[in-house]
Image (spheres, rainbow, N blue to C red):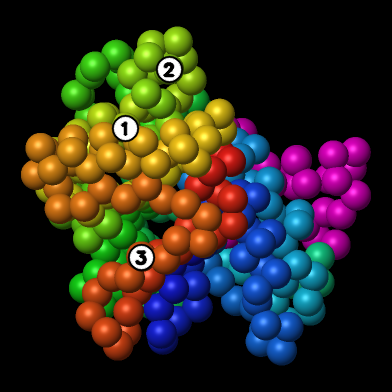
Amino acid sequence: MVLECDDADPVVFDLGTGLRFWGLDWPPSVPFAATALVSHLHWDHVQGLPFFGPLHQADSKIDVFGPAQEGRSLAEAVDGFMCPPYFPVRVTDLLGSFTFSEASKSFVTDGYSVTSAPVPHPGPTVGYRVERDGVSVAYVPDHQQPGCGSTVVDPAVLELCAGADLLIHDAQYTPSEFAQKFDWGHCTVDYAIEVARQAGVSRLALFHHDPSHTDEDLDALAVVAAKAGAAAGLSEVIVASEGMVISLGRPPGDLAAGAAGSVASTNA
Ligand SMILES: [Zn+2]
Ligand SMILES: [Zn+2]
């Protein structure tokens, strides 16, 4: 997922496999610069980093924010998976420059106002809210539903998402799938709609689809989710897909959220 606007560098939500495809489109003549907001370090959220072409250019730069890790820094944690024998190139071997920072509750980067909050999920995990020019996007990709049919939402998550113009949210399971995998750190589509409803969000993008769901499954899900969303008072429920672009705000100065590459369909 990438946030783009006319007058600033992009913000990348997580570093999943979609990053590689997005990097292929980056013009070689334009120095790469971006902020990356990493929700947590599970494989599906960082696996694109070693394969992101623009960071092999000397004039590229990325500022990475992520949750505080247990007993080590964020940079040390990244170095722990991007190293031999898992991958021959370390972050420090790349030609581009990196900064790693632990995401505080609120901070400003490149003119974006960012808020982070802990999200229920195995291991240190945060969600983000990004605001610029009066437009706000909340990103909660992995969210543990408390139980089957539960409508209980962590107050910190609700505060993070409150009134956002767009909520990008975990929607991995159907109710029957959740019943089998109730402690795998994710939630149902119905729960995502419930989070949006309680947070007063009218536009919801369903994300982090289960890898076993086919395009046909997602088409069917879109119909059901649209009805459920309308019943909950939401104006729009979007099933995020590769290459999708959602425009927000007032033109010009648009803030657009694009589901880049395969992030939306391959996260586990
Ligand atoms: Zn996860
Ligand atoms: Zn995930």
Residue designated by label 1:
189
Residue 100 shows in the view = no
Q: Is residue 84 visible?
A: yes
Q: Which corner quadrant holds the C terminus?
A: top right
Q: Is residue 71 magenta?
A: yes
Task: Give the residue type that dot 1 points to.
Answer: Val
**How packed is label 3: few (under 14 Cα within 10 Å), some, or many (20 or more)?**
some
Q: Is mark 2 within 8 Å of ligand 2?
A: no
Q: Which residue is mark 3?
A: 246
Image-based side of 163 in relation to 70, left or right: left
Task: Look at the numbered disc 1 and give the secondary structure of its residue.
Answer: helix
* Magenta region: 64-93
Q: What secondary structure is marked by label 3?
A: strand
Q: Which mark is residue 177?
A: 2
The verdict on residue 54 being magenta is no
Distance from disc 1 to disc 2, alpha carbons, whole Å, reads 11 Å
